[in-house]
Image: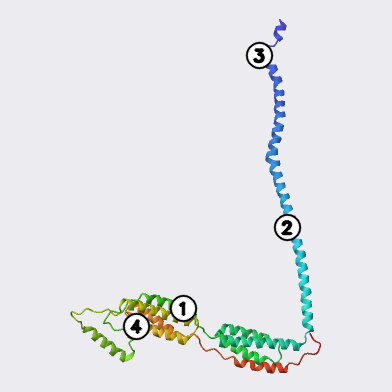
Amino acid sequence: MPEQAHAPTGAAAAARPRRRLWPALLAVLLLAGVPLGAALLWQRVWLPLRAELDAQRRAQAELGRRLDALETWQSVASDDLAALETHGRELAARLDQLEPSRLTAWALAEADYLLRSAQRAVAIDHDPARAALALRLASASLAPVPGSGTARRAIDAARSALEQVQMPDIDSLRNALAGAADTLAEAPLREPGASPAEVTPSGWRGAVKQAWQQLGEVIVVQRVGTPVQPLLRPHETDYLRQQLALKLAAADYALQRRDTEVFRRQLADLRTWATAYLDTTAATTGAALATLARLAEVDLQPPLPDLSGLHAALPTLRQATPPPADGDP
């Protein structure tokens, strides 16, 4: 009976094989987990690191290319700088070889040309700005000439006088004239029987005239049974509009040419026609006529300084310059 006491039961015998399978199963799992972990490590760590290394390698290659280009440009710039320095030394050497008398003669010739240009800009073109620039350059040209202080002071004084001249703005004047022209082109005609508006004088004469005008407005004389004839017939109205347009065009042309006399004459004729045939009591028409009166007061060519005496010092300076030595370039 002792053998029966030591014999394992059925449940214990079944548990022994299961205990032996756990180590084997654990070993299998470990062997399968190693490649999986390695794959995850490769995907999450090594792949981004490799991509970053590739980007750094490309950036380094680009920096190397830029460095090579910079070195090439530096070499070219150094060559250009060396050539420029060589050219500068050659030019300085040639200037040193020139005799001072030749430099003085060149400066006097340049100043003479610039002074003539300034005189032409004043007398013909009426352009004080261009004349002042020519005088500035002429004074600078005479700077290295010995004894040119008096001539330069006269030139600088004339330049200062030119710079103080206030020239009218032609563009703004043309815009004002165009605005008045548009207003007069649409202005209503004066009604039959109405007298053109006159400018009221100032002082006691103006007060008396205004009183008479007010008294005349009280007494109204009308013709009964006779139709009122129009001031202008249709074809005459067209003729009037065309004449106003032509006179405005002529005034604009004179304005562009800076012809003050013709400009004022055309504006005077225009105001005469407008006052005689247009309704000057309308606010817009009165404003347009006031604009024409203001434009007629503008001097399109204000007086400019006389530059004819600036050449007087040049012959004296030219005679004081010694002739160049023979054989000089």
Q: Amino acid at mark 3?
A: Ala
Real-space Cα distance between discs 4 and 2? 80 Å
Q: Residue furthest left?
A: 225
Q: Amino acid at mark 4?
A: Thr
Closer-to-camera residue (192/286): 192
- Of marks 4 and 2, which one's residue comes earlier in the chain? 2
- Of marks 1 and 3, which one's residue comes earlier in the chain? 3
Q: Residue drawn 68% across and 94% down?
A: 315
- Of marks 4 and 1, which one's residue comes earlier in the chain? 1
Q: On the picture, is 302 further left or further right than 72?
A: left
Query: Which quadrant of the structure image shows residue 135?
Result: bottom right
- Give the secondary structure at mark 4: helix
Q: Considering the image in quadrants, where does the C terminus appear? A: bottom right
Q: Up-down: is 61 above or below 130?
A: above
Q: Nearer the viewer, mark 1 or mark 3?
A: 1
Label 4, residues with CA under 10 Å away: few <14, some 14-19, many ≥20: many
Name the spot of residue 243 as percent of width and height, x first. Answer: 39, 80
Q: Which residue position holds label 3?
A: 11
Looking at the image, do the residues carrying marks 3 and 4 touch, with CB atoms under 8 Å apart? no
- Of marks 2 and 3, which one's residue comes earlier in the chain? 3
Label ID, residue 66: 2
Name the spot of residue 58 as percent of width and height, x first. Answer: 72, 50
- Give the secondary structure at mark 2: helix
Label ID, residue 174: 1
- Of marks 3 and 4, which one's residue comes earlier in the chain? 3
Q: Across the whole image, how many numbered discs are drawn on residues?
A: 4
Name the spot of residue 198 as percent of width and height, x first. Answer: 32, 86
Q: Nearer the viewer, mark 1 or mark 2?
A: 1
Q: Which residue position holds label 4?
A: 275
Q: Amino acid at mark 2?
A: Arg
Real-space Cα distance between discs 1 and 3? 123 Å
